[in-house]
Every structure is written in structure tokens, then in C-alpha cells.
Amino acid sequence: MDDTTQNQQDLSLPARLEAILYLKGRSMTLGELAEIAAISRDQVEIGLITLMADYAHRDTALEIRQEGQRYSLQLRDGLGELVQNLLPVDLSTAALRTLATIALKKRILQSDLVELRGSGAYDHIKELLAQNFIERKRQSEGRSYWLSLSEKFHRTFSIKTDELKPRPKPVEVALKVDQVA
């Protein structure tokens, strides 16, 4: 193997690990990274060391953070105030996705939302209720709750109700053979 081929492999491994950490959006173990990248744990460790050194020498908002046996791609410390000023609300990404699901449905049963988003939706619902982005009313028949958007949601995100309506699908005209004659 010549030096050029070796250099390309060295460069691609950190880039692949960076992409995995970015796309997963959570901290991961060496084993998880090795499985996804289809390489050995030793190779992952070398790639992460290279990636961490690269981030340490760049003036960038991101860094590879190690906490115990887990690694993640995160914003550097000290950027929290900037992020808070840019984001209109203090919600986790998962809670924002759950809120988007409720917004698309306009009104949804909590049980249906949990089926769509998983059991973590219960925590998202608590977070959204605590910040007054959604309203919850007991279902008249059944044990679940109806979830809908609150006035605060509409004020915060400046979304008009008609913008949440699904676009109509084109109507297809089906003609039977006997109708054509």
C-alpha cells in the first residue's frame, strides 16, 4: 500500500466516525461505533483520537466529548448563551419532533402519539405541557387524552392555523369502460 492510499484511509476513518456521531445525535460507546462503521474497536479508538486532536486544533464550535466510555459530537462549552438566543424555545430535539407531530395532526390522542413516537413521548408531553406549548384534555370515551396546540405555540412559532392544513391531493378521475361509450 502506497502512502497516498494509507493517507486516504486515515482521513476517511475520522470523517466516517464524525458522520456517525453527528447523525446519531447521542453519545456512543466504542462498541456501538465499531459495529456501525464495520471496523474493530481499536480502529475506532485510533480514529476518535485523530478526530479529537483535529477538533482541538481547529477554531470550531464543535468538539468530540468523552464522558466515561461514551463519545459524542457536541457544541463547545461557552456557546450555551448564543444557542439560547438563537433558539426560540428551550426544548430538546426529541420534544420538538413530538411537538411537530402534534402540529401536523392538529389534534391527536396521546396513545396514538406514543405509538408513533415511542414511549419517550410521555416525557416529551410532560416537557411540552410544562412549557404550555400543548393542551391536554381527557377523552370523553376511553382512557387516553386528546393533545392539541396551545395559544403559546401559535404565538411562539407564528404559525397560522391554515398553514398547518395538509395540502389537498389532486383528484383522480376514474372512468369505467362502460361510461366512456
Image (cartoon, grey):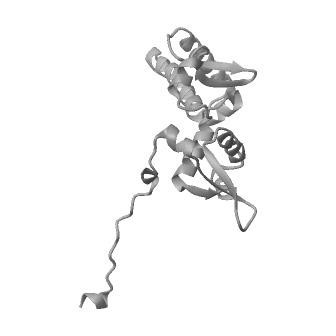
Compare residues 83 and 152 and report the one nearer the observer: 152
Q: Position of residue 169 (x, y in %)?
A: 38, 64
- Residue 125 versus residue 51 in the image, above or below: below
Compare residues 146 and 82 and report the one nearer the observer: 146
Question: In the figure, residue 18 lies in which quadrant?
Answer: top right
- Asked if residue 62 can be seen in this view, the reply is no
Q: Is residue 179 left or right of residue 25?
A: left
> On the rendered image, what quadrant is the C terminus found in?
bottom left
Q: Position of residue 58 (x, y in %)?
A: 50, 10
Q: Is residue 83 left or right of residue 132?
A: left
Question: In the figure, residue 170 lies in which quadrant?
Answer: bottom left
Residue at position x 34%, y 78% in the image:
174
- Residue 101 versus residue 93 in the image, above or below: below
Q: Is residue 95 left or right of residue 143?
A: left
Which residue is farthest left? 181
Q: Position of residue 73 (x, y in %)?
A: 60, 24
Q: Is residue 105 left or right of residue 132?
A: left
Question: In the figure, residue 113 lies in which quadrant?
Answer: bottom right
- Asked if residue 94 can be seen in this view, the reply is yes
Compare residues 48 and 6 and report the one nearer the observer: 48
- Residue 119 versus residue 10 in the image, above or below: below
